[in-house]
Image: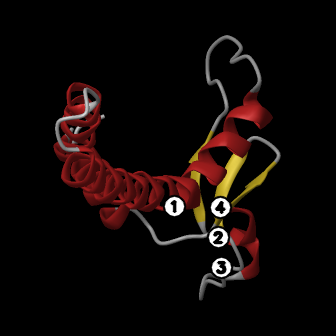
Amino acid sequence: MTESELTRLESLAAAATSGPWEARRASVYVANYRSPLPNNFMMWQGLIAGCHATIGKIEREEENAEFIAAARTATIELIAEVRRLRASLARVSKALVHNVGDCGYCDTAHAISEDAKQ
């Protein structure tokens, strides 16, 4: 995944309703959301998405809702982890290139360095 793809996902996550989200049956809600709506609208308070079929049958409705709710928080965390690991790899590969010299491993160290840039 390129940096521009990570940035796009990060932008999408930032523009979405803030989390955490939670799954309840086959729907996704903002966790602990309290609305000013009257009680007869309570079932819709904080609704983000429904994984229900209006025609036909959607397989694994509840599992889909669980995944969507978990992805809200996990996406941001995974983007941060990818960037952290890339930065660590770049530091290690720079040290390898700097410290190895002409001992025959420079091609490998250079390849690692190039991979870290992607």
Residue at the (79%, 36%) spot, across then down? 62
Residue at the (33%, 66%) spot, across then down? 14
Q: Are dots 3 and 4 in contact, CB under 8 Å?
A: yes
Give the CA distance from mark 1 to mark 3: 22 Å
Q: Position of residue 86 (x, y in %)?
A: 34, 51
User: Which residue in the protein does label 4 denote?
Assistant: 29
Q: Is residue 75 left or right of residue 29?
A: left
User: Which residue in the protein does label 1 denote?
Assistant: 77
| Lower sequence index among marks 2 and 3 | 3
User: Which residue in the protein does label 3 denote?
Assistant: 33
| Lower sequence index among marks 2 and 1 | 2
Secondary structure beneath label 4: strand
Q: Are dots 2 and 3 in contact, CB under 8 Å?
A: yes
Dot label at residue 28? none
Task: Kindly identify the amino acid type of the residue bearing the numbered disc 2.
Answer: Gln
| Lower sequence index among marks 1 and 3 | 3
User: Which residue in the protein does label 2 denote?
Assistant: 45
